[in-house]
Image: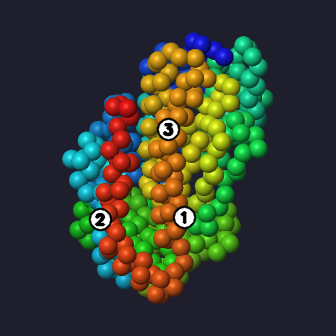
Amino acid sequence: MTRHPRKALIIGAGIAGPVAAMFLKRAGIEAEIYEAWPYSTGIGGGLQIAPNGMHVLAELGLADELIARGSIAESFDFYSQGGKRLGSLNRNMRERFGQPAVNMCRATLNETLVDKAWSSNVSVFFEKRLVKIEDRGDQPVIVYFADGTTAEGDFVIGADGVHSMVRRHVVPDGPMPFDTGLIGFGGFVPRAVIENLAIGQRVETTFGQSGFFGYGFCSSARDGGAMWWSTQPSHGMTAAAYRLQTQDAIKQHLRDFHSGWHDPIPAIIEAAENIVVTDTLDVATLPTWSRKRTLLIGDAAHATSPHAGQGASLALEDAMRLGALMRDGQELGLTFQNFEHERRPRTEKIVAIARRNGNSKRQFSPTGAWIRDHMLKLLLPLSSRGMDFMYAYNPRAT
């Protein structure tokens, strides 16, 4: 295997890909990024970067910019379907962990990372859909794309998400993404829809007898500065099937599903436009994250459902740690093994937490929902302490 790799081929220009490219550049390794989709400036809904992810962005000099373009989340507050407060998590994050949690538009994060990569002399190519990877002995690794072009390098990083094509090369007969039985709706509404509620910078979330709803500010923009999401049992209906419906039909479904939920949930649904619908997917634990000169990172390696709010932050951590390990100059296969040995225990623990959290958003009987709500009131303080390990992690200090 290559002892002194000089060029990385990175598949995926989402979150992990551009960040890995920049940290590899710092390690003296050239990087090229290949993204399957066309360049877009308006993709996705909202997300939160936790303090552990913000440490990575700070290392790139981007934390202050993204805080300014997003909105600090001072806490997560939980309510019952009728509006009764159940408790709170994640208070005083900046003071406790050195960085705040920040809500932002996924498009804002993605554009910022790609622009920063470009300015760091990283080449980014769009509409390059991976077909196969060829890795033969001491020859350069060759990646083949659907448009008939190829690229050569010393190693490949698969940062192409939950539907990773690189994963199929690393683990040819490995697990495929599976539907968790939950479906997500989300988007943005004008700040004015929730501004008069005096929620400040809190994120407010509600557990229903069936499903879950959340909202909070994600930027200072007047016309779309608040994000919202609804998680609910799919009842056999896929996201693709919903996306075939009109926006009016999707909105009517949300009205019906959340009928009787506390304010401002009905007003948010009425104000929603361009509603995004996604399946909530998961991937079983992989037997390995690498094969020869190809390594998986981010959701390609350890896809996590969104119920712990850590998918983006774990991808950021991976990218930074890989760059640090590559600086050590060890043999490539050993570097990949060390990366997996270091990262696997942490990521698998968080993936398991996300799966468990998702169970509280399924269908309950009225009695079951009442019991769950009362248990949440008792357990949230303990849960808060038990989750500190996620946020306290600083990739730079590892």
Amino acid type, label 1: Gly
Please tell me whether mark 1 sits on a helix, a strand or a loop. strand
Image quarter in which the C terminus is found: top left
Sequence-first disc among 2 and 3: 3
Alpha-carbon distance for marks 2 and 3? Answer: 27 Å
Look at discs 3 and 1 and give the one toward the viewer: 3
Along the horizontal axis of the image, is 296 left or right of 107? right
From the image, tell me which residue sits under label 2.
381
Q: Residue at x 31, y 80 (%)?
A: 84
Along the horizontal axis of the image, is 374 left or right of 138? left
Instruction: Tell me: residue 87, above or below residue 310.
Output: below
Question: Which colour style is shown?
Answer: rainbow
Sequence-first disc among 3 and 1: 1
Nearer to us in this view, 265 or 86? 86
From the image, tell me which residue sits under label 3.
343
Alpha-carbon distance for marks 2 and 1? Answer: 27 Å
Instruction: Tell me: residue 39, above or below residue 116.
Output: below
